[in-house]
Image (cartoon, grey):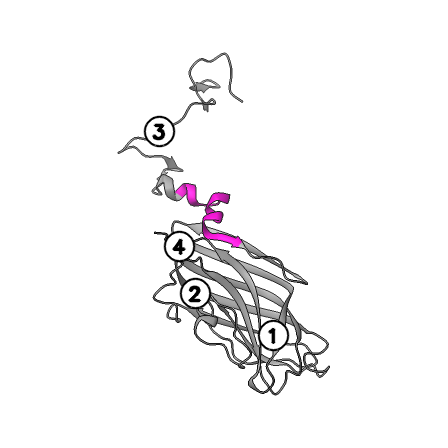
Amino acid sequence: MADSTYQPKVYRKDGGDSLKVASGGHIDVESGGELRLGGTAIAATAAEINAVGTSGAAAAIGAIASQPASGSIAVAIERFGSFFSLTFTLTAARLSVTDAAGSGSSGSLKLFDFAQGGIVPLGCRQDYTAFAEGAALTGGAGDASFVMGLGSVAANAGDGALTGTEVDFGAVTAAITLSGGTGTGGEFSGAGLNSSAGLDGTSTAVDLYLNWSGTAATIDANSTIDVTGTVTVVGAMLGDD
């Protein structure tokens, strides 16, 4: 707490062992000067320091989407400069599945609303550790076979596959086939997806969807599937017009 007996807003105390900055005071390191910690100069700019670990920095990336009808999603947002990392925790997060009969099936859950601006996805890690089928999904057989991925658009009417903008943040997984309703799956992908040239969110902000598509052979009816696991998406924000 500042000592009111001192008139300057920046002063030494405790025999010179401490430096106090009262309300309204500031420390300004001029050009050519350095601020050091343990003898090492801090090289980051003021803008970079301000962008790390603040709620404002997280808000500049975007916000988590609405919670699913059942279960939950949570996100940890990290940012350094223009780069960001989003780590989602899915806890029995429910996707509604539309059965398109002979052509396959699909389901999507919006995870994130990005702030308006251009985005370049740089990598994604998907780790799905548990699933729970809705009662009608496979008629109780518990043998759903499907693929998953992350895209800037929701999965289209069931075609048994995920392509293009359905997977431009996280590549499509290999087929995941449940046994007795249980199973696991995942996928790692780096730069070079369909989005490698960037996503233009300057007019309409980009969204992030968890996408699912099941095979015609195993999906019997409109239903749900609950997903548990973690997903990490890394990218760069390119700013707005």
Which numbered disc covers residue 184?
Answer: 1
* Whole-percent x, y for residue 131 in the image: 65, 72
**For the residue labelled by badge 1, is the local secondary structure a helix, a strand or a loop?**
loop
Q: Amino acid at mark 3?
A: Asp
- Contact check, label 1 and label 2, Cβ < 8 Å: no
Q: What residue range appears in magenta?
A: 49-63
Q: Residue at x 56, y 57 (%)?
A: 65
Which residue is identified by label 3? Answer: 28
The alpha-carbon separation of the residues under discs 1 and 2 comes to 21 Å
Is residue 125 shown in magenta? no
Which residue is identified by label 4? Answer: 117
- Camera-side residue: 229 or 166? 166
Is 185 situated above or below 7?
below
The alpha-carbon separation of the residues under discs 2 and 3 comes to 38 Å
Disc 4 crowd, CA 10 A, few/some/many (<14, 14-19, 20+): many
Q: Residue at x 56, y 68 (%)?
A: 127
- Camera-side residue: 12 or 87? 87
The alpha-carbon separation of the residues under discs 3 and 1 comes to 54 Å
The total number of labels drawn is 4
Q: Amino acid at mark 1?
A: Thr
Nearer the N terminus, badge 2 or badge 3? 3
Residue 83 shows up from this direction: yes
Q: Residue furthest front?
A: 203
* Whole-percent x, y for residue 137 in the image: 68, 79
Quadrant of the snapshot with the N terminus: top right
The alpha-carbon separation of the residues under discs 1 and 4 comes to 35 Å
Nearer the N terminus, badge 4 or badge 2? 4
